[in-house]
Image: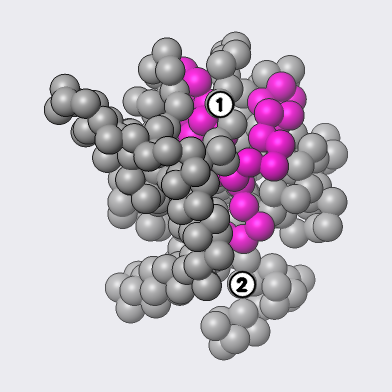
Amino acid sequence: MPTLASRTLDNGLDTGLERQGRIDLACAFRWAARLNLHEAIANHFSLALSADGRDFLINPYGRHFSQMRASDLLRLHTDDPEALNRPDAPDITAWALHGALHRNNPQARCILHVHSKYATVLACLADSRLPPIEQNSMRFFERVAIDEGFDGMGLGDEAERVSRLLGDKPILLMGNHGLLVAAPSVAQAFDDLYYFERACEVYLSALASGRPLRIASDEVARKTMQQWLDYPGFAERHFSALREMLLESEPNFAG
């Protein structure tokens, strides 16, 4: 969307790349609200701007996902001691968790953290593994890290601990807590969020039937996972469609 990316904010400081990142992240917030993937004002998304990940965008505390605009997003640095003293400061857990994640995982450009219904239910089970029962769940075969050491809200040492669990996985299922998705772009992160939540919904619905599950072999699951990874431009096309729909119905998100 070059016409949007070429605009600058009123302060004239944003590059086209940052501008497009703001638009995409605001779009992700709005669609998370539309799809009921959020939880009141408790969740948070971020997008790294610098190569080392320490300079990033994140949502301000208290603004509802359904009202988020590109210009609302805060540009912060992980080492800024005054980040929580500004009038539009981020949520304290968002600052701690995303700061640690971006500092320790520079490859994770976009990080989405939600307490979506079905992923959170899975995170509450003693066995939080997602078996390969259909092709959406197979997409995440061997690509989910599970945190089984919950020790309170993501502050201080807990934020640092969680930030080191991600590794090279796109999904961190946070036991007793919720879901965290990490990806190289907003489009990929949102696509993973959407499909992981769908996969959790199908799995839990299948469990509720009380009938035996048809679980694919590791070989088939691994093959299907790779086919997902090789699928040409899927996440980008999905997110582009969402952005176009939002531009028609809620164009103020890009402002």
Say which quadrant the N terminus sits in.
Answer: bottom right
Question: Dot 1: within a 10 Å radius of its alpha carbon, few (fewer than 14), some, or many (20 or more) residues?
Answer: some
Q: Residue at x 38, y 26 (%)?
A: 122
* Residue 115: quarter of image: top left
**What's drawn in magenta, residue-wise?**
159-188
Confirm whether residue 203 shows in the render.
Answer: yes
Dot 1: what SS?
A: strand
Q: Amino acid at mark 2?
A: Gln
Residue with the mark numbered 1: 146
First of labels 1, 2 by sequence position? 2
Q: Is residue 190 above or below residue 207?
A: below
> Which residue shows up at 34% across the image and 74% down it?
245
Q: Secondary structure under badge 2?
A: helix
Instruction: State the residue at coordinates (38%, 49%).
Output: 136
Amino acid type indicated by mark 1 = Ile
Contact (CB < 8 A) between labels 1 and 2?
no
Compared across the picture, whether 35 is left or right of 147 comes to left
| Residue ID for mark 2 | 20
- Say above or below: 92 vs 87: above
Residue displayed at 62% across by 60% down: 185
Label 2 neighbour load within 10 Å: few <14, some 14-19, many 20+: many
In the rendered image, residue 51, in percent from the top left (x then y), is placed at 83, 57
Mark yes or no: residue 65 visible. no
